[in-house]
Image (cartoon, rainbow, N blue to C red):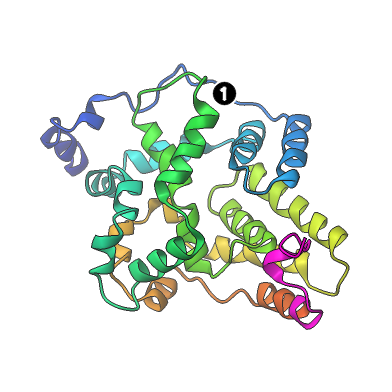
Amino acid sequence: MNALTARFEADTSRDFLQLPLFDERRPQLRLRPAKALHHFRELLKDKENTEEVFYIFEALPWRDLRKSGERFLTSERGLDIRVKEPDLPTILDDHAALRRMPEGSLAHAYCDFMEKEGLTAAGLVEEFQRFAKDKPKYNDQFQWYMNRMRDVHDMLHVLTGYGRDALGEACVLAFTYSQQPSPAHLFIGYMAGLNIGKQVKSSAPVLRAIREAQGLGKACPRLVEQSITELLPLPLQEVRRRLNITPAMHYRAAHAVWQSMGVDPYDLLGKKAA
């Protein structure tokens, strides 16, 4: 009996270990570019309509998701993290506990970001549940991995320094593509970049910023497979060093260009003034 098998047998009381690793009834999603384009156009009408993003990911799936997920779930590290972090939103939304961690930590930076933006980890879960309310439910260990990919999104904003402006969201998606290579990440990221260039004529290095984000994501180990509870108490800059996340220079340069034009990067289309 190897160490991993022993751990599984020792933890048989844990509910998730009673579940199948992967429910074979899960459909094998196929590429549907036309559907993705339709939902992207709907997203352009309201970038806060997160449900459209889920439709795009459904239409442009990560081909090797099952293989990657099962590899992690059957590793000793994967088991350790599932035991410590069975439900990431519950951990991330406990700001009282996070605020007890040291000043300057990732925990404080995360709370600052979420409170400033009026966001909660549970809010993203609710968005997904609205999208999935009429879809079949699959009770397997793989669902934990799927949920976790969703739940680290806002943490990536904090770690990379990309804001929730249009270019920042596009860059986070390009960064995530190199971690979780669903074509949807690049599709939304680059289509959003092209739309920014169309709507706001300037010398801002929009597409270079998105390409840079893709490279930064490739240099960083897959965040979904890191122990978030281990990272939260650490100084933000130390976490960035551990994960090899370096400054996003082209993103900052794009913001500087827009600001020199009197354009708010967080309000590129002037909706606030309107």
Residue where numbered disc 1 is placed: 28
Residue 241: horizontal and vertical position, in percent? 43, 75
What's the residue at 41%, 49% (across, down)?
Answer: 121
Magenta part, dominant SS: loop
Residue 179: horizontal and vertical position, in percent? 53, 53
Residue 165: horizontal and vertical position, in percent? 65, 62
Q: Which residues are magenta?
A: 258-274
Question: Which quadrant would the C terminus be assigned to in this image?
Answer: bottom right
What's the residue at 72%, 29% (across, down)?
Answer: 32
Q: Is residue 193 above or below residue 242?
A: above
254 and 28: which is toward the camera: 254
What's the residue at 77%, 75% (across, down)?
Answer: 258
Q: Is residue 63 above or below residue 75?
A: above
Residue 75 magenta-highlighted: no
Residue 266 magenta-highlighted: yes
Q: Is residue 106 above or below residue 196?
A: below
* SS class, disc 1: loop
Question: Which quadrant would the N terminus be assigned to in this image?
Answer: top left
Q: Is residue 68 left or right of residue 182?
A: left
